[in-house]
Image: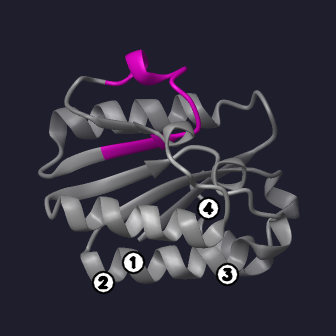
Amino acid sequence: MVKLITGGKGTGKTKKMIDMANQLANNGKGNVVFLDDDNRHMYDLKHTIRFISLHEYPVNDEKSFLGFLCGVLAADHDIEVIFIDGLLKIANIAMDNVSEIIDQIETLSQNHTIDLVVSLHCEPVNLPQKLKEYMVV
């Protein structure tokens, strides 16, 4: 299942994701992965969480991001949740195309029985109607 955390800059999206990830690291059954575009929050996460900074990899569009995500899933069959902080920035995606990639991520989620928590720099009112069902309050 995909869960979206939306909001403008400085609204606490990343902090909420870090708190969720740390809680799952304590209470979850599987592995937790946190994808970010830099190392800023690496030390805010519990050491059992697999932190991946995407600035170290050639991920610069939707296709390379989905390929990278598939590689992460293929490398670890015990993943319970993947957190993706700042999807639009990480994968260089325009807001107009976000519905398509969320659909593809949802398919991966269902096929591999994992959850993906994704933050989007977007005010909830500007989110496409199709994606509002994925929003976390």
- For the magenta stretch, what is the residue range? 33-45
* Residue 43 within the magenta-colored segment of the rendering: yes
Q: Secondary structure at mark 3?
A: helix
Q: Say left or right for 24 vs 88.
A: left
Residue at horizontal 26%, vertical 76%? 112
Report x, y in % for residue 73.
28, 65
In this view, the mark in front (4 or 1): 1
Residue at horizontal 56%, vertical 38%? 55
Mark 4 or mark 1, earlier in chain: 1
User: Alpha carbon of mark 3 to alpha carbon of mark 4: how far?
Assistant: 16 Å
Mark 4 or mark 2, earlier in chain: 2
Residue 116, numbered circle: none
**Residue of label 1:** 108
Q: Secondary structure at mark 2?
A: helix
Which residue ends up furthest to the top in the rendered image?
43
**Residue of label 4:** 135
Q: Secondary structure at mark 4?
A: loop
**CB within 8 Å, label 3 to label 1:** no
User: Alpha carbon of mark 2 to alpha carbon of mark 1: how far?
Assistant: 5 Å
The quadrant of the picture occupied by the N terminus is bottom left
Task: Determine crowd level at label 1: few under 14, some 14-19, many 20+ residues with C-alpha closer than 10 A.
Answer: many
In this view, the mark in front (3 or 4): 3
Report x, y in % for residue 71.
33, 64
Residue 100, numbered circle: 3
Residue 110 higher or lower than 6, as above or below: below
User: Alpha carbon of mark 3 to alpha carbon of mark 1: how far?
Assistant: 13 Å
Which residue ends up furthest to the front in the rendered image?
58
Mark 3 or mark 2, earlier in chain: 3
User: Alpha carbon of mark 4 to alpha carbon of mark 2: how far?
Assistant: 21 Å
Q: Amino acid at mark 4?
A: Met
Q: Say left or right for 117 vs 87.
A: left
